[in-house]
């Protein structure tokens, strides 16, 4: 069982074409972290996830930042470290998923930052655990 999520990133692709768009780093409020823990621990796919301080980084060369509030279809590989409740060891996990995303509350000086973003219509394709030592 896992009890903490850290080091969150999402490799994002266009949900229709599959074209790579960029990486998103973000924070999760505790209620949203619980949703990810329930997904990995119990297989419960969340209906939605709210991301805070979402920053789009390392984008494709021809990437155009999304419009505020507009919903986009995306596919992604959400990568995070999940802490084992008993040992305290962090396990790298990849969650392959499709989702719709809507950015909210952007600071207009930075078109690659959203105060929050909402993932909805989430479908999980696979959860992969990296058990190799580094």
Image (tube, rainbow, N blue to C red):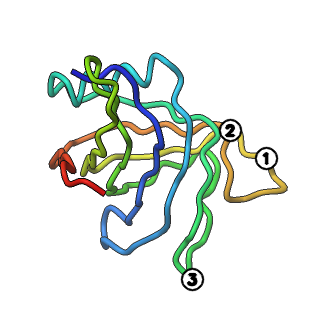
* Residue at the image position 20 percent from the left and 54 percent from the top: 132
Mark 3 and mark 1 in contact? Answer it, CB < 8 Å.
no
Name which residue lies at 49% across and 61% down: 23
Q: CA distance from mark 2 to mark 3?
A: 24 Å
| Gap between marks 2 and 1 measured at Cα | 7 Å
Label 1 crowd (10 A; few <14 / some 14-19 / many >=20) = few
| The label number, if any, that marks residue 107 in the structure image | 1
> Is 106 located above or below residue 42 in the figure?
below
Instruction: Tell which of 105 and 124 is nearer to you.
Output: 124
Q: Is residue 81 left or right of residue 103?
A: left
Q: Residues within 10 Å of mark 3 (few under 14, many from 20)?
A: few
First in sequence: mark 2 vs mark 3: 3
Labelled disc at residue 34: none
Tag 3's secondary structure?
loop
Residue 114 x, y percent position in the rendering: 66, 45
Labelled disc at residue 115: 2
| Residue at 42% over, 31% down | 49
Q: Nearer the viewer, residue 133 or 112?
A: 133
Check whether the beta carbons of the residues at disc 2 and disc 1 lie within 8 A of each other: yes
Q: Earlier in the sequence, mark 3 or mark 1?
A: 3
Q: Position of residue 53 (x, y in %)?
A: 64, 40
Q: Which mark is residue 61?
A: 3
List x then y, in percent, for residue 3.
34, 19
Q: Residue placed at 18% from the left, 44% from the top?
A: 127
Helix, strand or loop under label 2: strand
- Mark 2 burial class by Cα count in 10 Å: few <14, some 14-19, many 20+: some
Please tell me whether mark 1 sits on a helix, a strand or a loop: loop
Q: Earlier in the sequence, mark 2 or mark 1?
A: 1
* Quadrant for the C terminus in the image: bottom left
């Amino acid at each position: 069982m896992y009890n903490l999520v850290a080091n969150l990133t999402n490799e994002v692709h266009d949900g229709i074409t599959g074209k790579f768009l960029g990486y998103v780093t973000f924070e999760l409020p505790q209620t949203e972290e619980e949703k990810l823990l329930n997904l990995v621990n119990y297989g419960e796919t969340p209906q939605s996830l709210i991301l805070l301080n979402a920053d789009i980084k390392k984008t494709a060369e021809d990437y155009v930042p999304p419009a505020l509030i507009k919903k986009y279809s995306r596919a992604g590989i959400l990568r995070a470290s999940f802490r084992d409740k008993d040992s305290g060891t962090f396990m790298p996990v990849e969650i392959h998923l499709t989702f719709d995303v809507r950015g909210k509350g952007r600071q207009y000086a930075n078109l690659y930052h959203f105060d929050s973003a909402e993932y909805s219509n989430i479908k999980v394709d696979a959860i992969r655990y990296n058990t190799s030592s580094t």
